Image: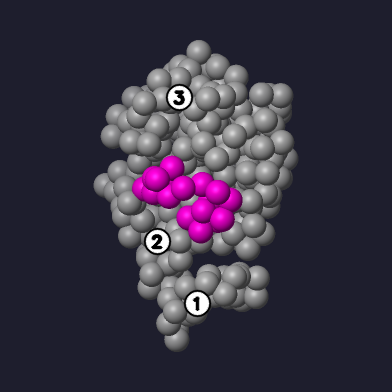
Amino acid sequence: MVNNKENLVDTISEAEFEFAKPEIFSHLSWLNYTETRHIPDNDLTGNVSTSPRVLNEEKFLALKPDGISYEDWLIDQKALAIARLSIIQESGGFDKIGHPLAVHDTSLINLDADIDSVDYTKPRANATQADITLLSTPGTASMIAPADCAIATIAFPEEKAVGQIHIGFQGAEKDIVSKALLEFQKAGLDTTKALIYISPHVQTGFPLADTEQRAIHDDLLEHASNEMRGIIEGNTDTSGVWPEVYLTQMVLDEFEKNGIDKNQVEVSPIDTFSDPKVFSEYKGRTDQKADGRFAVVVGIKK
């Protein structure tokens, strides 16, 4: 039987949330930042995905929950994901949270104008897609739910605006950082004074065995600068595994190329592929563990 809403909310623990702002944002009184955390002893705690792609029947069978059908379990998990977002919204002092579906492209959604178009409960096929967000309205926030990609949260202290960039290997190959910064500049923001936090993301042991990832690797090599090509080739072993993943360095290089000093950027030490505190889609594939999504939410207080 499906749990009622009150019982579901009661199962959510404070340990599922990290409300402390990153150090680089600590002096920005107008900004609130949250990430969710995965509690290893309870398979899908902290998950914010409502997508059947993530909460699929194969995952249900792997978790083997007792006394519940897949259909009822799916309803419960979607309700829990939405409840977690409600907790973040209340804690952050937000009226609305915009949460587009990140698809490894370079499109931007202006949440000041279009936040109502981003409906978290829509089926995946109908969801609003964007990999870059921007907002400046008090009481609004942006959320992107990554698998193993990096989310660059970019605060503009003078303008009191904030954006997010979803950066995976496909986004890096499409030069998403430069394109996002150009969009921010078009909006009148001074990117040279931006403060940036890079969320937890895959940093070690990322597998390249399947065809898709090999294609990404080849595309990166083809379009990389001479410096980056050396980083890529030097960190890929003969079996196709990146023992020291270069996504972090690629992201940092892109910001530096665009005139942002390294002192303006803070990188999370959490590696999604090895740390049990956050979800990892690829860790889930290889270890048959829960592969939900964690939330990266930033917004402006009312």
In the image, is residue 58 part of the stretch drawn in magenta?
Answer: no
Q: What residue does disc 3 label?
A: 31
Please give the residue where the numbered disc 1 appears in the rendered image: 230
Upstream in sequence: badge 1 or badge 3: 3
Closest to the observer: 275 or 156?
Answer: 156
The percent coordinates of residue 230 (x first, y second) are 50, 77
**8, above or below 232, in the image:** above
Report the Cα–Cα distance between label 1 and label 3.
38 Å
Q: Is residue 256 magenta?
A: yes
User: Quick check: 59 above or below 229?
Assistant: above
> Residue, x 43% and y 53% (percent of image)?
201
Q: Secondary structure at mark 2?
A: loop
Per the image, label 3 sits on a secondary structure element best described as strand
Q: Which residues are magenta?
A: 251-268
Image-based side of 220 in relation to 237, left or right: right
Q: How far apart, in angstroms, are the residues tagged by discs 2 and 3?
A: 27 Å
Q: How many marks?
A: 3
Q: Picture coordinates of residue 122 (x, y %)? A: 66, 35
Instruction: Find disc 2 in the rendering and name its residue.
Output: 203
Q: Which mark is residue 104?
A: none
* Three-letter code for the amino acid on which mark 3 is drawn: Leu
Asked whether 181 or 114 is in front, the reply is 181
> In the drawing, does residue 277 fall left or right of residue 34?
left
